Amino acid sequence: MRKKRINIAQLHWGFPPIIGGVETHLTLLLPTFVKWGHAVSLLTGSCEGVKTRYVYKGVGIWRSPLMDLNWLSERGIEGIEEDVDRLFRDFFRSVKPDIIHVHNMHYFSEIHAQKLADFVLKKKIPLILTAHNVWDDSLFLELSKEINWSHIIAVSHFIKRELIGVGYSEKKITVVHHGIDTKMFRPNLDTKRIQKRFPQLKDRRVIFHPARIGLAKGCDTGVKALSLIKKHFPDIILVMAGAKNIIDWGSTQQRDIAYIVELIRTLKLEKNVLIDVFSLKEVAQIYSLAKLCIYPSSSPEPFGLTMLEALSSGKPIIVTNMGGMPEIIQDGINGFVIRVRDFEALASRVIRLLEDDILRERLGSTGRQMLLGQYRKERMARDILTIYEKILGR
């Protein structure tokens, strides 16, 4: 796909090695734009041990502590107006964007949002927001309404409904579901390397919960369900992904981890749980090794990129009826949908899938077919590029 070159400036609070759904989304989207002949630059948060300027797969990366939410959370955002203004002016002067596309800039800092709005108003550059999340507080309401976004991309119909609910016009919002790298996440990967690193996975029934540890991700529900599953399958092992580098605005991660670890000890499940930090390639191998995946989120998950990773890997996934997840997972078709915090229902569905190989393989195969038809990264990039072209009048 080659059309007239567009200079695209992207802004988000994090980028790998910072781990998260939006960060992964950017690693898929931005290099695809570059591949199609567009110029792409990203302004993001600083990260210890990472350069402040470099190129990632053709994408120019700029890093600054003024975009690092962890640093800002500790320091506070008072008195940074001039620094933020200077940072934005320097970045945009260098990039010379035709369009500015920001991710979750409708929250966290009124200073950043307002400085951005002032700049685009002065320069008359279109400003696109991708809303990956919504929040239930006044700051979200203020920044969502006060900034004159040229257009908003919602990652799910759930997010779109929430935005309409706070006063946005439906005409200004387009839903673009995430896409996935179907070559990286595919069935029947070689899992020897991951089993060598973690020998406790060998000859075990593996369940994968592909989310950073936290109560909002339903990790406690998964552990409670595991206690019931173990009675039927003593060799069961639940793999949960820790994370060294995440955006922890509000500093809840360590408290959640401490509680989950204590819950595992209380239920005597130490030998049935593996918690570690995995690379992206190792995550793909764990999907391939697992019998099935779970994502029993207890908060309104806006979309859940890990659902696509599971489906692309040919694995059924059990999710809760929260947020945008039921838009992708169809109960009994490519996985199961259960109620929030219902660990007994979660255990029941897992046991059923472990007992019925034919059902498990059918759901996994159907999920892979659905994903190939609807959720490739190229489709996602094409849909977003179409929005750019429309806004720019091309």
Image (cartoon, rainbow, N blue to C red):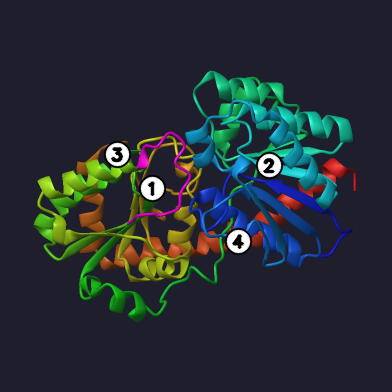
- Mark with earlier residue (1, 2): 2
In the rendered image, the vertical position of residue 161 relative to residue 385, given as above or below: above
| Residue that carries the numbered disc 3 in the rendered image | 255
Q: Sequence-wise, which precedes: disc 4 or disc 3? A: 3
Principal SS element in the magenta part? loop
Q: Which residue is mark 2?
A: 102
Distance between mark 1 and mark 3 Cα atoms: 33 Å
Instruction: Identify the disc placed on residue 331.
Output: 1
Q: Secondary structure at mark 1?
A: loop
Q: Nearer the viewer, mark 2 or mark 3?
A: 3
Left-right relation of 105 to 200:
right
Name the front one of labels 1 and 4: 4
Q: How far is mark 2 from mark 4, CA to CA?
A: 22 Å
> Dot 4 corresponds to which residue?
376
Region rendered in magenta = 241-253
User: Quadrant of residue 129 in the image?
Assistant: top right
Labels 1, 3: front one: 3
In the image, 11 versus 315, the foreground residue is 11
Label for residue 312? none
